[in-house]
Amino acid sequence: MTDLEHALESRFGDARVGRHVPLAAFTTFHVGGPADWLVETRGSDEIVAALAAARSAGANVTIIGGGSNVLISDAGVRGLVIRPRHGDIQRVDDTCIRADAAVTINGLVRWTIVHSAAGLEVWAGTPGTVGGAVFGNAHFGGRPIGDRVVEARLVGPDGTVRDIAGADMGFGYDRSRLPDTGEVLLSAAFRVSRGDPAALRATARESLAFRKRTQPLDTPSAGCVFQNPEPGRDRVPEGMPWSAGALVDRAGLKNEAVGGARVSPAHGNFIVNDGSATASDIRRLIERCRARVREQFGVELREEIRYLGEFEDLRI
């Protein structure tokens, strides 16, 4: 028995510690190899305990929430994968609610509507969890979710748990401080106001309808693959939109395919899995899109998704 196996089983019991667990079913791309070890945690205390077990064994840790915005390699992920589950939501007061990292964004939106809490209803239809949304400062319609974060409860690499003001989370376009610090989100407090449930539900339905009209929600994908170009950082040819999807489209890449991976004909910034794609297919198609946009427009597209596990270096 390895040190990690012993530490995990001591805390969670043999039945809850998965070995060589396929991860494809836990991602919205539906691709990816196995985790060496997998634990599904139930609450913040168990996340802290799983991290402590991995730290004591010197094992690598990967967190997977809803499995959107990630591409897991066909070879899988070494070390321990933690999959937070069964989160809670609580009202702090009329201006603030707190949600555990494992809560899905759709679950959060439904809760706020039922409890007359306005401010998050526009996020209806967003895949993934609170943890993933805060990690990457998810955005919709030009609105980053970090703008709503009042406070984040984090556990650091040394196991220390502390509360951090939203202003100190290092939020930017598709980013927070978490990838740099190695901290893990346990919960987040969001700013809300009083709202009418009927009006909130109508806004949520409008957001969901917009997603259904413009995104291939009926086919496995990871959401938008590339970040949009940023003024001041990128140079986009005059007359071209500052949109990664539009650049991919105008480069003639819609419906481009590698194996079972295809650029969605509905949205140029979505790559979809026809059911037979591998992670390698998707990665090769991503690099083809990047190279074609660079060659035609001189714009270097940057991924919005994260790669988990080992991939061959395909950059051209």
Image (tube, rainbow, N blue to C red):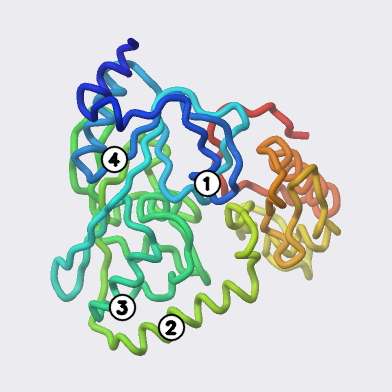
Mark 4 vs 1: CB contact within 8 A:
no
Q: Position of residue 38 (x, y in %)?
A: 39, 31
Identify the residue position indicated by label 3 in the image: 113
For the residue carrying disc 2, how many other residues have a C-alpha within 10 Å: few (<14), some (14-19), or many (20+)? some
Q: Is residue 255 left or right of residue 241?
A: right
Q: Position of residue 179 (x, y in %)?
A: 42, 39
Mark 2 vs 1: CB contact within 8 A:
no
What amino acid is at disc 4?
Thr
In the rendered image, the vertical position of residue 78 relative to residue 179, given as above or below = above
Q: Position of residue 136 (x, y in %)?
A: 45, 51
Tell which circle, 4 or 1, labels the residue nearer the N-terminal end.
1
Q: Is residue 62 left or right of residue 159?
A: right
Identify the residue position indicated by label 1 in the image: 27
Q: Nearer the viewer, mark 3 or mark 1?
A: 1
Tell which circle, 2 or 4, labels the residue nearer the N-terminal end.
4
Q: Quadrant of the C terminus?
A: top right
Q: Give the residue at the far left of this rendering.
A: 93
Identify the residue position indicated by label 4 in the image: 41
Q: Is residue 93 left or right of residue 186?
A: left
